[in-house]
Structures are given as C-alpha cells and as structure tokens.
Amino acid sequence: MQNDMPSDHELIRKFQKGDPDAFDKIVRRHLPNVMGFFINITRDEMAAEDLAQDVFYKLYKHLKRFRFESAFTTYLYRINTNTANSWITRNKWKNLLHLDQAPDRGEEDNRLEQEWTKEELWAAIERLPRKQRTVVMMRVAQELPYREIAQVTGMSEGTAKVNFHHALKTLKKWFSND
Amino acid sequence: MIDFEDKLMQLGKVDKQDTDPDIFLAAFHGFRREREKAQSRMRSGMGAAMFIFLLGIMTTMQLSNQSQDIMYMTQYSTESSLFDTEIWDLETDISLEKQLTYVDDITLFLLEEDDFWETMDLINDIYTNNETNKEETL
C-alpha cells in the first residue's frame, strides 16, 4: 500500500508556493512532539505552548527560505533546542528558585514520586553547561543519534559523545548527592 | 553508568502531547498576526524616528549655518564702513546721480499721466538749472 501522506519537504514546497494549508499540516504533524519536548523542559503546559508557538512562528518566517539541504526534522530540532536554551537562560534564577521549592520526596505517592523525579531530572539538565545540555536535550528528549546531533549542532560526533558522557557523569554525581 | 543512562533515557523521554491542533493553530495564527502587526508598527515607528532624527540634524545644520551668517553680519555691522554716512550727507543727497534718478521717476510719472508738456517743461528746467550750475562753477 502506497503512503499518501506528503513528506515534510513536499509540504514545505507547497508552502513556499503560497499554500498556507501546507504549513498547518506541518504544524499538525509535529505539534505533539514539540509540545512534549517543551513540557519536559518547562514542566508547565502554558509555557510549553508559548514556546511551541515561538518555534512555529520562527518556522513560518524561515521556511520560505528553506533550501532542502537537510531533513526538516534536523532544522526543527535545532530551533527547538535553541528556543529551549534561550528559555532556560531567561529563567535561570526562576528555575533555581523552583529547585529550592521541590516537594519533599516522602510525602508523595508512587506516581507523583515518578513525576517529581522526572521534574528533578529536567531541572538538573537545565543546570548543565550549554553544550552538554544541548546534547542531552537532543539525545534524551528527541532521541537523536550522535550523527544527527553532530549535524544539528555543528560539532563533531566525537565531541557530541564526550559532551554527553560528561553530562551523564555530572548528573549521576548530583543525583547520588541527593 | 549504563544503568543510569538507561534510566535517564526512560525518564527524559518525551510523552507526545495530545494538544488539540485546531485550538493551537487558531491561537498560533492570532499570535502570528499580532506579532507581524507589532513588527510593522515597530518598523514604521523606527522609520518615523529616523525621519525626525534626520530632520532634526538637517535643521540643526541649517540653523548653525544661519548663526554663522548672523555672526558675519554682526561682525560687519560693528564696523562703520557698513552703513556709510556719506549717503545722508546733504551734498551727496543732491548729487547728480540722485537727481537723475529723481528726474527719471518724475518724468515717467508725468508721461504715464499723459502730461507731455509738463514733462517737457520739467526737462527744460533741469537742463537750464544744470547749465546755470556749470556756469557758476566756472
């Protein structure tokens, strides 16, 4: 059976020719992933929606000049990661405050405990240096292989691996201290 | 370390969100239009500010040039040579040049009034006067 769904590149070509519905189709296709990514980062649905709007606005503006040299998802992940990094920098102090206000582990039931751990993990990821954080966000949240991470960030595959390894060590240290 | 990595990958996994795309798209296009409007307002505001700035610079330049002129005039006005009092002297006031201008004016006026004979009389008078003056000086 042939797949009738147009590819991202086909939709972008249509959008570049002036079809606004093509852009809406791109949004519908990638929205669940983008929203999921930002909910992980922000742990706040409203903030995640704002960031998702920001990402799609950047896409809307720049897709007209998209040159089809790379996969659309590579482009999208780069915008996602840059937007997330900007948000983290902007909210640095606010996020530090959030860490101080983390709920007491003993008071939570099992489901909430898991939620809290996830929340704590993302708060810890935010504290990582920018390069390590970028690699972790791509590897963990977007499940990108190192080859693609290297392509998106412009670093070599080896550098991406080293950064991820350093990030893992730091995170492990932080968690074992807890 | 591998266990920790597995745990991290499990915990960090993005749970795909079932956000209503229609609601999101409606909000997104509203947001996009607002942003575009704000950007165009900002662009026109910047243009207006730039125009006012350039106008201000041009006015300032013109005013500074004018003040130089004023200074220049003031400098000269302090010198007695600018308004020579010679023009007000009684002698120069009735100079030949002045007289001729006066005669020209009167002649033209009389001619315009169609008073030809009066004009002729005047010219004769002046001629006679000049001749008398010449003889006196001799």
Image (cartoon, grey):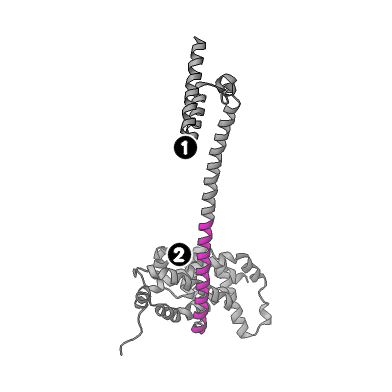
Residue A87 vs residue B36, the one in the foreground: B36
Q: Chain of mark 1?
A: B
In the rendered structure, the answer to whether residue B10 lies left or right of residue A6 reads right
Q: Which residue is mark 2?
A: A162
Residue A121 picture location, percent across and down:
57, 74
**Farthest residue, direction top:** B138
The numbered mark 2 sits on a residue in which chain?
A: A
The magenta stretch is: B20-48
Viewer can see residue A166: no
| Residue drawn at the location 50% of the way across and 28% of the way down | B103
Q: Residues within 10 Å of mark 2 (few under 14, many from 20)?
A: some
Secondary structure category for the residue under label 2: helix
Amino acid type shown at disc 2? Val
* Residue B138 location (% of width, % of height): 49, 9
Pick the front one: A16 or A111: A16
Q: Percent position (x, y) of residue A99?
A: 64, 70
Residue B67 forms part of the magenta stretch? no
User: Can you see residue A91?
Assistant: yes
Q: Residue furthest front?
A: B117
Residue at x 47% of width, y 31% of height = B117
